[in-house]
Amino acid sequence: MLDSTAPIGIFDSGIGGMTVARAVTKLLPKENTIYFGDTAHLPYGDKSTAAIQAYSIKICNVLLQQNCKLILIACNSASAAAYELAREYVGSKARVINVIDPVVDYIKERYEGKTVGLIGTKQTVLSNVYKKKIDALNRAILLKSLATPLLAPMIEEGFVDNTISESIIARYLSDPELQGIESLILGCTHYPLIKKQIRQYYGDAVEILDTSEIVAQSLRAWLEQHYLINTKGEGKRDFYVSDYTQSFEMSTQLFFGKQITLSHYPLWE
Ligand code: DGL
């Protein structure tokens, strides 16, 4: 039996997943959350499936030790590579949620017979996880996907609203693979930060799906359905990283909206 007052664990390859953590804490301000950023191993987007699985299980252990009622895999690459394994590993000790299924559910209701685009890391796109899940819906939804590996490092360097970012974004979005789409899934933790630029590129022609918001809504719905909303919580927020640098701490502002204190928690000791 899970405890409603237990914290929600959220993990990502680094601090980008704070876009998801931010959406969750905005929607559920009383929940206590524990964020784990695997900064020692980022980026996950170029790593092998086996490596991401090993890191993810290690992090699940950390979050289980903290008695989390729910573990949210906030990273698209880890959701693609390690969700099934993590869910099996965690078993009944906590619920595991990924950032892909809520988006697939959202698309299922709204995009029957339509064409949907996806941008993300190489791991997310080349794993074909979105495609397999969307095809399994049997709703005649055509997915057109493109790996856009330059976008995450570009955003981390603060290039979100200048001529350089504008031309990189335009270069990717004008790729023949993405033509004819009616909505675009932002399949990476970092992309909510360039949502405005992507929206400017398309105008109103394409719906931009901010996965962090969709995931936060789905997480709240699940907690409600299972009577696991923490009504007595104080909204305590803990942030851990597997490798600490001051520059990571400064960059938290980009992703969480305000600068926060990171605690160092080495993974392999
Ligand atoms: N968090 C990753 C994702 O959402 C992006 C950064 C990385 O490659 O680690 O796919």
Image: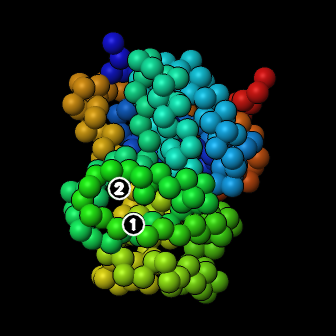
Q: Which of 173 and 204 lies nearest the eye of the viewer?
A: 173
Say whether residue 137 is left or right of residue 239: left
**Residue 155 visible in the picture:** no
Say whether residue 183 is left or right of residue 157: left
Proximity of marks 1 and 2: CB atoms separated by less than 8 Å: yes
Which quadrant of the figure contains the N terminus?
Answer: top left
Q: Is mark 1 within 8 Å of ligand 1?
A: no
Q: Is mark 2 within 8 Å of ligand 1?
A: no
Percent of width and height locating residue 268:
76, 27
Say whether residue 222 is left or right of residue 63: left
* Residue annotated with mark 1: 143
Residue sitting at x 59%, y 23%? 61
Say whether residue 105 is left or right of residue 19: left
Circle number at residue 134: 2
Percent of width and height locating residue 44:
66, 49
For badge 2, the amino acid type reads Ile
Percent of width and height locating residue 255:
54, 56
